[in-house]
Amino acid sequence: MNSSGTTVRRRISVVLAVVALLSPLATGLATAQSIQGASGAIVVDEGETVDGIDAAAGTIVVRGTVAGDISGAAGSIQIAESGRVDGDVQVAAGTVFVDGAIGGNAEVGAGAFELTETGRIDGSLDVGAGSVRVDGAVGGDVRAAADSVVLGPNADVGGEFRYDADSFTESPDATVAGGVVEDTSLSGETGVAFGSDLVPSWIGSAYGVAVNLALGGVLLLAFPRFSRGVAERVGEGPVVSGGVGLLALIATPILLVLVAITIVGIPLALVGIAAYVVALWVGSVYGRYALGSWVLDRLDRPNRWAALLIGVVGVAAIGLIPWIGGLVDLLVLLLGVGALALGLRDRYQGRDDVSPSEGDAVEIG
């Protein structure tokens, strides 16, 4: 069989697989109305408004406005300080951070949940998690079942605070209008937020790992030489890769805004937004792959498939650690996006010694 024909057919198959995998994400971002289905990353940027989110994703970040409800599962969910959800939030995730505002009720199942000092929930909060920290405002009642529950100094609860926890800490500066009550029956209740009847909090994390592994597998099969080059760039020049990633992360949205200023540029900007978010996902997967490659290189046991597995699973595990997990996610993203940008630049400038068909056609191991 003709090797070039095989390569072409393989590339077509891979492209179709990528389109199938990414189409829910691209469609949701392009319409900017309602986001549904399965995605690697869902981001509502500051100044952007969507009708609602009903999806399973690796990551959900709200910096803009969700006019309706958020429901679904994810590896991590963050409602940033600038973000607002006008409706209810019903989610299961590895980690959930609320720095912004929720206009309705929140029902959460998570490995870790935190309502920060800038966060506000106008309705009630029902949460079941490994650890719960409430340090913001809740207009109604709070029911929390967790191994560890913390009521912080900035907490302002308009109703009753009812909890069931192995460890409970209450700051003397916290304000709870309806009083604090220990209720050991909470862990046995049903519903989104409680006990063994809850969809396990690891479901969101497992989904995030699965889609990242799927995308990583597609990239390694389709572009083995390019993928190896990305990992090598991160290993040999992490500062350069991280710096380029930070620049791309900041400069690209600014450029898209400038493009969107004109009516003619709006369609281009919408396409650019979709491409930008897809690039962030691809970059984050490449960052994980590069981290796994670095670990195996130190052990003198290089293997691209093991590197992908170690990187994706390892970063997911670290991501469950509050604050540290978010920092590691950001660093991995910057490294991956930077190395991806540098690799694409070199390809565009023709710096590769081997053509794409020669370099990416076959690689074993």
Image (cartoon, rainbow, N blue to C red):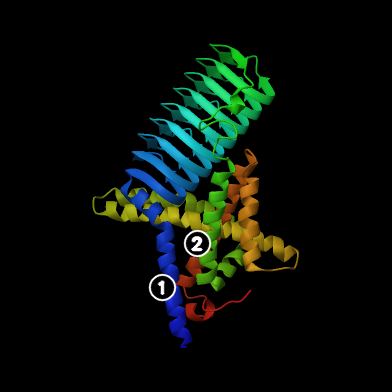
Q: Is residue 345 above or below residue 312?
A: below
User: Which numbered dot is residue 270?
Assistant: none
Residue 157 visible, this orientation: yes
Q: Residue most toward the bottom?
A: 1
- Residues 348 and 66: in front is 66
Q: Residues within 10 Å of mark 1 (few under 14, many from 20)?
A: few
Residue visible at 48% across and 32% down in the picture: 81
- How many numbered circles are shown? 2
User: Residue 120: horizontal and vertical position, in percent?
Assistant: 48, 25
Q: What residue is shown at x 61% (from left), y 15% (from top)?
A: 181
**What is the three-letter code of the residue carrying label 2?**
Ala
* Residue receiving disc 1: 12
The residue shown at (69%, 68%) is 302
SS assignment at label 2: helix
Asked whether the viewer can see residue 44, the reply is no
Q: Amino acid at mark 1?
A: Ile
* Residue drawn at 40 percent across, 52 percent down: 25
Q: Tell me: 263 left or right of 57.
A: left
Residue 209 at x, y = what percent?
Answer: 57, 53
The residue where tag 2 is placed is 341
Residue 182: image x %, image y %? 64, 17
Percent from the top left, x then y, of residue 57?
48, 48
Disc 1 versus disc 2: distance between alpha carbons?
A: 23 Å
Is the residue 323 above or below the residue 168 in the image? below
Front-most of residues 249 and 288: 288
Q: Report which quarter residue 114 is drawn in.
A: top right
The first of marks 1 and 2 along the sequence is 1
- Give the image quarter of residue 325: top right
